[in-house]
Amino acid sequence: MDTGVKRPAVFLDRDGVLTEENSYITSLEQMKIFPYAEESIRKIRQKGYYTIVITNQSGVARGLFTEETLQEMNDYLMKQTNVDAIFYCPHHPDGKVEKYSKACKCRKPGTGMFEAACREYAIDMQKSYMVGDRAGDIIAGQSAGVRTILLESGYGTNRLEKEVTPDEIIQDLHDVAEYLPDVSGDYKLRK
Ligand SMILES: [Zn+2]
């Protein structure tokens, strides 16, 4: 529901945030959505935020699964959780599939997916959040100018590839939904 009114967004990594972290998830059958995901997304949307998944899926570039398979997973995830949108990066600089083997701006910690989301939705970035379980998620969010939340529900904070300083460290998406301030009254339609 894009009313054209500017609202903040909660940008979400996929694996470890909405689904169980499982290195490469190569098929729909392997994708396990957390049981609390749907309710958490509902609560976050009720609090006045867009919910937008931004996910690195370099398995496409590595030839582990096709972009069509990824789109099937995306359709399923959208149906099961009701997130507003999913943006993905299928690229990798050292990929095996030529079409996707390149250095791009969308792969996190790059900010290309945030920029793509901002072109499609009227987003108040100053009150937005990035939620993820990897160092790259936190760095990407900081580069995009949003607040950052590191989750323990994925790889876990003891397995970070780099030292990062998120604004908050929270157990899982269920707790994020509780934590976020309610901004639903701040963005009324002007009539
Ligand atoms: Zn990319």
Image (spheres, helix red, strand yellow):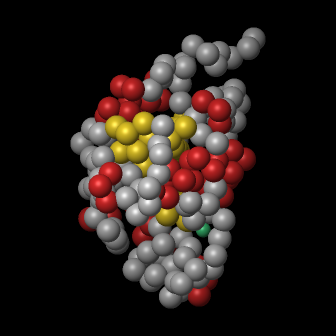
Q: Which residue does the image show at 31% across and 34% down from the upper left? A: 174
Q: Which part of the image, by quadrant, shows the N terminus?
A: top right
In depth, the one of 180 and 59 nearer the eye is: 180
Q: Which residue does the image show at 51% across and 79% down from the upper left? A: 61
**Above or below for 46 versus 169:** above
In depth, the one of 38 and 175 nearer the eye is: 175
Residue farthest along the right direction in this orientation: 191
Q: Which residue does the image show at 63% across and 50% down from the upper left? A: 143
**Above or below for 72 versus 92:** above
Residue 167 percent coordinates (x, y): 48, 37
User: Residue 118: in sight, yes or no?
Assistant: yes
Residue farthest along the left direction in this orientation: 35
Q: Which residue does the image show at 38% across and 33% down from the upper left? A: 176
Residue 141 percent coordinates (x, y): 56, 48
Residue 102 percent coordinates (x, y): 63, 79
The image quadrant where one finds ligand 1 is bottom right
